Amino acid sequence: MDKRRTGPVASGGMMNGLWGAFGIGVLSGLRSMSGVAALSWAASLGRIRTGWLPLGPEARGLATMAALAEMAGDKMWFAPDRRIAPSFLVRLVLGAAGGAALAGHGVSRMEGAVTGVGGAVAGTLLGRAARGATTRSGRDWARALTEDALAAGLAVALVRSTMGPGRP
């Protein structure tokens, strides 16, 4: 019998270990580069263990600038729909990578990656449904800026959550 599975699941530990993975997936679905920036901040602060994330302030600054540029570019008339195949695929890959990086104690990186993909699907589809397709009216802009604020808040919450107990 696999005690790693029955113990954490029975005590809620596995679910606790997957919240960060799901959250980074949702963030990647809402704003893909915000997910990258959150991971970069967490890695540079030494709060997650990955050998594949750049740790320096330059990488953190570049990722943050890319997230801000995405937020600005998202409101342009020529911005592609997040649901087209290339954009959706990037969000899924980033959700998987982020989910693996933020998988908590007692959760495998694979479980974190799968959970991150699920979060990316949810963030992509629910974000698009709530936001709408355009930014032509004041109401559209308000929804777009609300989505930006939600993404930024989620990014901060995820970085802060990496400080908590049970982190690898």
Image (cartoon, rainbow, N blue to C red):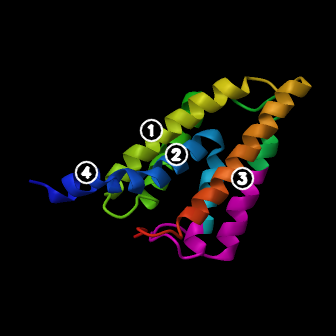
Q: Which circle, 3 or 2, is nearer the viewer? A: 2
Of marks 1 and 2, which one's residue comes earlier in the chain?
2
Q: Residues within 10 Å of mark 4 (few under 14, many from 20)?
A: few
| Residue type beneath disc 4 | Ala
CA distance for labels 4 and 2 = 24 Å
Amino acid type, label 2:
Gly
In which image quadrant can residue 64 be found?
bottom right
Relative placement, left or right, of 143 versus 6 is: right
* SS for callout 1: helix
Marks 1/4: CA–CA distance: 22 Å
Total numbered badges shown on the rendered structure: 4
Q: Amino acid at mark 1?
A: Gly
Among all residues in the image, which is located at the extreme front?
11
Give the number of the mark in front: 1 or 4.
4
**Spatial CA span between label 4 and label 3:** 38 Å
Task: Name the residue type under label 3.
Answer: Ala
Which residue is the site of mark 4? Answer: 10
The 10 Å Cα crowd at callout 1, few under 14, some 14 to 19, many 20 or more, is many
Instruction: Give the magenta range.
Output: 42-68
Q: Residue 67's mark?
A: 3
Q: In the image, is 117 to the left or to the right of 137? A: left
The residue identified by callout 1 is: 118
Q: Residue at x 27, y 56 (%)?
A: 8
Q: Which comes before the other along the chain, label 3 or label 2?
A: 2
Residue 59 on the magenta segment: yes
Camera-nearest residue between 101 and 76 = 101
Residue occupied by mark 2: 25
Mark 2 surroundings: few (<14), some (14-19) or many (≥20) residues within 10 A: many
